[in-house]
Image: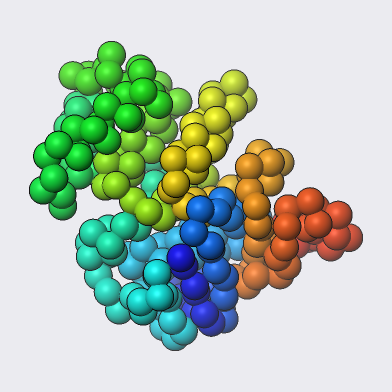
Amino acid sequence: MLKVDGIDVHYGVIPAVRELSLSVDKGQVATLVGANGAGKTTTLKAIMGTLPAKRGTIRYKGEEITGVPADRRVGMGIALVPEGRQIFSRLTVGENLALGAYHRKDKEAIKKDREWIYTLFPVLRERINQLAGTLSGGEQQMLALGRGLMSHPELLMLDEPSLGLAPIVVVDIYEVIKEINRSGITVLLVEQNINMAMKISSYAYIMETGKIRTEGAPNEVMKRENIMKAYLGE
């Protein structure tokens, strides 16, 4: 479904990702882990189109999208739930969800997706008219996930969904991620919580200083002697 081949991504003149290649198969949960500053978020932004790739190619479902604007990538079926949630705090829960479907015209399908999201996160139905900024951290993460799902993605990218959440909430969020994947949505997951990420993934990439250092099945990657070096960046 997704093939990234040799991309470089810079912030100004500073290289953040170098010669990075990865692929994600349809129906897969793939995880990208690494220490702070490894380039994980930058990689997702490049795939989403909010940061340009200086070189290399990005293909989605066989079509090159390297130069395609981010809003068009959303319409093609790619969604990103960003680090830190980035909900619209002064809008209601319902308004946040509606914005997730801004590009869609299929009203009945939108209604169906909204009801599915309420099934995944019943608290969002209860809070539909509540300002998003007044939600708890866990509820805000649920809203961010719901907003991403409202775009009806085929590829859902999640950036640090466990960040700042209580352990019991993290378990709930990961159960929902598994349910999302079972529904047929492909997931590319960025996480520092390596144990949670590896448990639900079928393939893993380990990043260090802007490059993929190792990859493979999660159980194999975790057994490699250099995994902690690559993960911790030490």
The quarter of the rendered structure image containing the C terminus is bottom right
Residue placed farthest to the top in the image? 126
Lateral position of residue 45 relative to residue 127, left or right:
right
Q: Which of 170 and 184 is in front in this view?
A: 184
**Residue, x 41% and y 33% (percent of image)?**
141
| Quarter of the view holding residue 166 | top right
Residue placed farthest to the bottom in the image? 55
Where residue 160 sits: x, y (%)? 52, 45
Residue 58 against residue 180 in the figure, above or below: below
**Residue, x 40% and y 62% (percent of image)?**
45
Residue 177 against residue 51 in the figure, above or below: above
Q: Which of 2 and 143 is in front in this view?
A: 2
Where residue 228 sits: x, y (%)? 80, 55
**Residue, x 53% and y 62% (percent of image)?**
25
Question: Could one spot residue 15 in this view of the protein?
Answer: no
Where residue 3 sits: x, y (%)? 49, 72
**Residue, x 27% and y 18% (percent of image)?**
125
| Quarter of the view holding residue 225 | bottom right
Question: Could one spot residue 197 in this view of the protein?
Answer: yes
Residue 150 against residue 65 in the figure, above or below: above
Q: Nearer the viewer, residue 143 or 54?
A: 143
Label tally: 0
